[in-house]
Image (cartoon, helix red, strand yellow):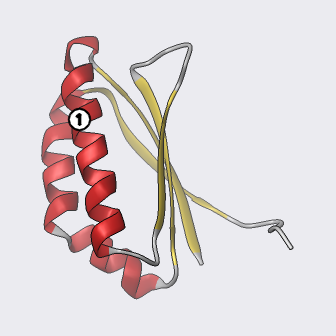
Amino acid sequence: MITKIVTYRVRPEALPLVLDTIRTFVVAIQEHEPATRYDAFQYKENPTEFVHTMSFPDPEAERAHQMAAYTAKFVEVLYPNCEVLPRFQDLKEVSQPT
């Protein structure tokens, strides 16, 4: 399993557009990548800051996600509207539910 976390901050005036884009993106992932776990979160105390977590079953699934048209569309909308660009980090699992 490949697990990543990404954090970023958007411009306040872009918040409605970004929220709509996130929702569309997550639906596309659910439709096209049933084996991918993808969650998007917004900080309660600062609604312009976001955290996304994603888990891919293997490198091929991660590559397919990266190359998907819906990922390109998400990036196309998100990046120009960021105050702080997305920062990706790899996570190492230390425990899982039994």
Amino acid on which the number 1 mark rests in the picture: Asp
Which residue is at 56% across, 13% downward?
Answer: 45
Q: Viewed as shown, does residue 97 lie left or right of 8? A: right
Quadrant for the C terminus, please: bottom right
- Callout 1 secondary element: helix
Determine whether 93 is above or below 48 in the image.
below
Determine whether 4 is above or below 9 in the image.
below
The percent position of residue 31, horizontal first and vertical second, equals: 29, 69
Quadrant for the N terminus, please: bottom right
Which residue is at 38% across, 87% downward?
Answer: 60
Q: How packed is label 1: few (under 14 Cα within 10 Å), some, or many (20 or more)?
A: few
The percent position of residue 90, horizontal first and vertical second, equals: 57, 61
Which residue is at 30% across, 56% downward?
Answer: 27
Determine whether 10 is above or below 2 in the image.
above
The residue that disc 1 covers is 20
Determine whether 25 is above or below 98 in the image.
above
Q: How many marks?
A: 1
| Nearer to the camera, 2 or 33 | 33
| Nearer to the camera, 56 or 82 | 56
The percent position of residue 46, horizontal first and vertical second, equals: 49, 15
Which residue is at 23% across, 22% downward?
Answer: 16
Q: Viewed as shown, does residue 89 lie left or right of 11? A: right
The percent position of residue 49, horizontal first and vertical second, equals: 44, 25
